[in-house]
Amino acid sequence: MRIILSRKGFDSSYGGAPSPIIGGRPISLPIPASQDEQTTYGAIGLGDHVKAATKGRMSQRNTCHDDPMFADGKCWLGQTGGAQGHLRNQGVTSGDLFLFFGLFADPATKERHHRIFGYMHVTCHGSPDEIAVHREWTPPPRRHPHFSGDWGAANSIYHGPGNTAQRAAGSLRLTRSGGPLNAWKVPSWLKDFGLSYHAKPERWTGATNLDSVKRGQEFVCNIGNAAAPHRWIDGIIKEIES
């Protein structure tokens, strides 16, 4: 089994601000649309949140890249280009687990930090044509952006059970208390199993400290059937679903 730490949502480059935590709940804001996409922030109930996060620079009328998409205990994710090539080269397939993380701001202190906000267990994946006839496929509640537009030959869809966190639990936070942003606290087994794009020894200090890379979308760890990582996964999913 592989765990994929998948960076998604607003950040300083895409959207220009962290996503908010509202009423104790992390709300990941999809990045602005990069192609001729039709879904607006208002259409998916995020108009007020994107306006507040960008201090009026964006509003409910702006279009967004509605991905990953969550509904009814399921998730739909599109990927293409170099990021999809990395997932393919790492052997990501059915049975693997995406843990989505992004940049958020603490509502009290305004401290920016990375945290996990959702997950997906992959049950099927492939090109839009391939996945649409897969026996595990469930159509999304609205048009997914990777089913249209010029995404290139590598364009792929991942689908399976998934959900988003209802509260900003401490166990879902990656950035260490006090920061800086890319100073993560991670489970002790991660250093031994390895994480793609994080091979340099100097990135790992102590058993649980990781200086995470500042760019990149998909970071993969192959945990196989090891007990400790699977216990950690169970705890993370239980927290998200609680």
Image (spheres, rainbow, N blue to C red):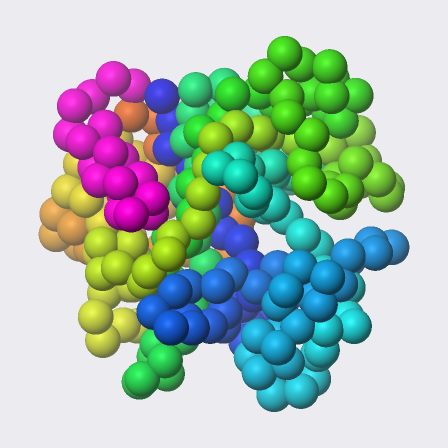
Query: So how many labels did they put on this image?
Result: 0
In reply to whether residue 115 is colored magenta, the answer given is no
Q: Position of residue 235 (x, y in %)?
A: 22, 40
Is 115 in front, or is 144?
A: 144
Q: Residue furthest top?
A: 135
Tell me which residue sits at (53%, 54%) in the image.
Answer: 8
In the picture provided, is 238 more to the left or to the right than 107? left
User: Percent x, y for residue 217?
Assistant: 53, 48
Question: Residue 236 location in percent, x, y?
Answer: 27, 43
The answer to whether residue 47 is above or below residue 186 is below
* 59 is higher (above) or lower (below) than 203: below
The magenta stretch is 224-242
Horizontal side, residue 75 vs residue 56: left or right: left
* In the image, residue 227 lies in the stretch drawn in magenta: yes
| Horizontal side, residue 61 vs residue 103: left or right | right
Residue occupying the far bottom of the picture: 55
Residue at the left extreme, as displayed: 206
Residue at horizontal 26 percent and vertical 40 percent from the top: 238
| Whether residue 172 can be seen here | yes
Compared to 134, does 101 lie above or below?
below
**In this picture, residue 240 sits left or right of residue 57:** left
Residue found 23% across the figure and 65% down from its top: 176
Q: Main secondary structure of the magenta part?
A: helix
In the rendered image, is residue 219 in sight?
no
Nearest to the observer: residue 51 or residue 152: 51
Quarter occupied by the N terminus:
top left
Q: Quadrant of residue 125?
A: top right
Question: Measured along the vertical axis of the image, is residue 22 above or below residue 169?
Answer: below
Image point (71%, 78%), residue name: 59
Residue 113 picture location, percent across and down? 36, 68
Q: Quadrant of residue 185?
A: bottom left
